[in-house]
Amino acid sequence: LDQKLIKLSIVNELYDGRIPDRVSIVGPMPVEFGRGESVLWIFNQVLSYRMTPDKRAESLSIDPASPIDSRYVSPAMLDKSHVPKKQLSEKANGDLVLTNRNIYFLPNAESHIRIPISRILSLRPYAEGFYVMCRPMKERSRAFLLDDPWFASNVIGRLAQLAHR
């Protein structure tokens, strides 16, 4: 219950235009954060995929030329949409670290993928996770499957909105 209340509080603060500061890291991190960058949440045991390029992939997200969608992602919205598993490739397992400036995917202690929030063009939430389309698209656009897609989609979507302003 405490974790759910903290997550609701984080989403609420982001929709009020404030960046929450609730998480503190104990121990070493394999990523060096930038000045003013703070951790919002860490998801463990996340699956990361690239989407295979085909015509259906274009319909998975918002038009790349338009800004990220400003709607709140409701739990009911997530239940209706599932990840198109036939379009997934290059599976990796690791931890996902959300900061106020970046998404870091850590498949192991020696490497990571960094997705700047400001480079996110669109976000597609799913019942199992979310897909982010980024600039440059081939290098950073990915699908992530995790345990709380509602929370992740709302946090990332709102951070991207704030970054684009």
Image (cartoon, rainbow, N blue to C red):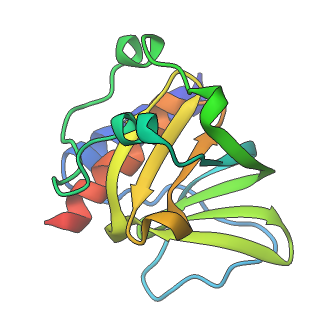
Q: In the picture shown, does residue 83 fall above or below 80?
A: below
Tell which residue pokes out farthest to the front in this image. 55
Q: Residue 111, image x and y in percent?
A: 78, 75
Horizontally, residue 105 falls left or right of residue 9, namely right
Q: Residue at x 65, y 28 (%)?
A: 85
Q: Residue at x 85, y 78 (%)?
A: 110
Write the residue at 61% across / 36% down: 87
Instruction: Identify the residue at the far right of this view.
Output: 109
Residue 124: x, y in percent?
39, 37
Spot the residue most to the bottom: 35
Could you tell me which quadrant the C terminus lies in?
bottom left
Q: Is residue 76 above or below residue 164?
A: above
**Does residue 6 show up?**
yes
Q: Is any part of residue 154 visible from this angle?
A: no
Compared with 94, 34 (above or below) is below
Q: If the image is split into quadrants, where does the N terminus sit? A: top right
Give the percent coordinates (x, y) of residue 133.
41, 54
- In depth, the one of 62 and 37 nearer the eye is 62
